[in-house]
Amino acid sequence: MSVINKAKEKSNYKARIKRSLRRFYAQRWLQLFAILGFVYILIFNYLPMLGIQIAFKSYKPSMGFKGMFTAPLARNYGFYHFISFFKDPNFSIVMRNTVGLSLMKLFFSFPVPILFALALNEMRHIKIKRIVQTVSYLPHFISWVIVYGILFSFLNTSNGVINSLLQSLGKEKMEFLTGKEYYYTIAVISDIWKEMGWWSIIFLAAISGIDQTQYEAAKVDGASRFRCIWSITLPNIKSTIMIVLILAIGSLIRGGMGGSNFDQSYLLGNSLNYERSVTLPYYVYEMGLAQQRFSYATAIGLFQSVISLLLVLISNYVSDKLTGSSLF
Amino acid sequence: MLATYKNKRIKRSTEDYIIDFVVAIIVCFVFFVTVYPFWYCIVLSFNEGTDALRGGIYFWPRKFTLENYNAVIGIDYIPTAFMVSVARTLLGTVLCVVFTGLFAFAISHKKLMGRKIYITAMIIIMYFSGGLIPQYMLYKTMGLMNSFWVYIIPNLFSAFNAVIMMNAFREIPDSLEEAAIIDGANDMRVFFQIVFPISMPTMATMALYSGVWHWNTWTDSAFFISNKSLKTLSNVMINLINQSESAAQTMVGNINQSQVTYTAMTLRPAAMIICVIPIAIVYPFLQKHFVKGVMLGSIK
């Protein structure tokens, strides 16, 4: 009995393999495309993830790529670099700037596109509405380098627009680009300027998807325009707002929806406003590529990635529980 | 909605006027704030440099000249950087769309063996990455440092684009593909001759997305390239913007120093405009397709 069963199983097993192979052969082209992409991801995304282990090791650039896997473990059970980051005199500055800027960007950059979309939606001249909307997301497609150039042209002390105006008004010039007290304001405003129109597209699209009969019914009941915005438009785009909020919180450390923390720190930062301009993504670059402290920089980078991931998961979970809208 | 307002024009309340007024102010403000910085750069770039230093130019050039543009093109590294940027944008975009497209095409088939593994691998990299240093070491080991290919090869695949393309490919009726297969076409031909043309709006969006990114990005050039003849335009722009007035005079070769009228103040916007022109050219296409693209990307 059991011998027969075993034989049967064996032939079943063989048949299954044969069937799988045949199926695989039938889709060999698709498999080729998928495997090409898969191998590419393995090399360019997952191999670097394995490289994260140097955060726990005493790795030196001279050890080469292989050295990332063979370098000796760092002190304190491998947590040496993390501990030294927490003890780093710059730690509190970096964290304050990163958290502060990110929260300010979330607080200001997030509601502005919603308000702008609501305003545009109330605009009754369709042509003007279309022109302003089209113009409003042009800055999204411009490099941060160019935005920096524009800021420079407007804010520099020798011939910037703002300072020329201040001077002609008989006021004193302001050191916008080097004074650390201006950095947060400039960073937040330029972030809003660049991304507002772009994110309003999503909200406008959501608004245009609202069933118009709701408005007509409300009007019959005598609802005012403001009441319509408050009680029909906003509740209808709630799930869109939540999804954008998750995205914004998820990318908080990188600098919110524009992901601008690094670009801003690098371009707008200088030795005079360093105390306000340095953020986590920039510090990783500074420690790693500028100062060649690879293990240390990777530890900071990992710290940043883990926080980002946690933020995505937490905001996703909270939104799922509260409103039922989630990314995954 | 427009029609209803028109019919009931007599009935407009104070609230209507207030809302219209506030909306008009917001819209005008946004328009001005967005357009003026670009306009100011254009004005400045067409104005004589030494004249501009006297100040007072806000809305129209005072002494019109094309010399700033001449001077920018005369800076030895600008034409090279421009060509590098053009090359990386064209090559990088085509290769990225094809490579990502093929992968997306494969995983859009439910019957694909191992589909779950491929998709999971793709989703994870959207939320987690190895970070700067391991990447740097990888490129160094692969010999991509100081090579033009560092612009192309690490950007062949985009998980974000792959998800959007996959969703677009799913919409295509299976019968189309099956018919082609029965007629003897292989999946390669199906992709290039059926799926790609049918999904043209999506593919165009992805190409524009990738193209704009390639044109604008400056970090890879700053991190991985030290050879000046391989720098991209957006990267060398940083140096140019930071150039002081005194240095600007000597930046341009082959020009009689005594006749120089450009200054850093006017060179800067001229270079910026040159950098923005390609974006401005594709902008009409961008805004036509992108509205759809951003919707596809954010709400899966």
Image: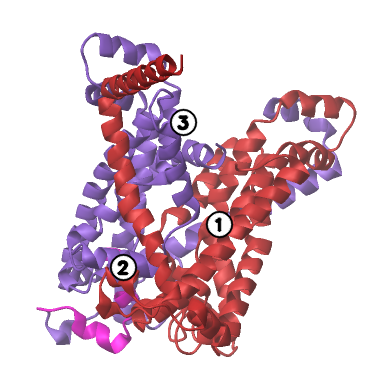
Chain colours: A red, B purple
What chain letter is assigned to the residue under label 1? Answer: A
- Secondary structure beneath dot 1 equals helix
User: What is the quadrant of the C terminus of chain B in the image?
Assistant: top right
Report the predominant secondary structure element of the magenta stretch: helix
Question: Residue A257 has which mark?
Answer: 1
Residue B45 appears in the rendering: no
Quadrant of res B240 = bottom left
Task: Tell me which residue sits at (42%, 16%) in the image.
Answer: B173
User: In the rendered structure, which amino acid carries the disc numbered 3?
Assistant: Asn
Looking at the picture, tell me which residue is in the foreground, A71 or B213: A71
Looking at the picture, tell me which residue is in the foreground, A150 or A34: A34
User: Is there one chain holding both mark 1 and mark 2?
Assistant: no
- Secondary structure beneath dot 3 equals helix
Would residue B290 be counted in the magenta stretch? no
Read off the magenta span: B233-254
Between disc 3 and disc 2, the foreground one is 2
Coordinates of residue B283 in the picture (x, y in percent): 38, 46
Q: Is residue A135 left or right of residue B260?
A: right
User: In the rendered structure, which amino acid carries the disc numbered 2?
Assistant: Tyr
Looking at the picture, tell me which residue is in the foreground, B17 or B213: B213
Q: CA distance from mark 3 to mark 1?
A: 23 Å
Coordinates of residue B155 in the picture (x, y in percent): 31, 52
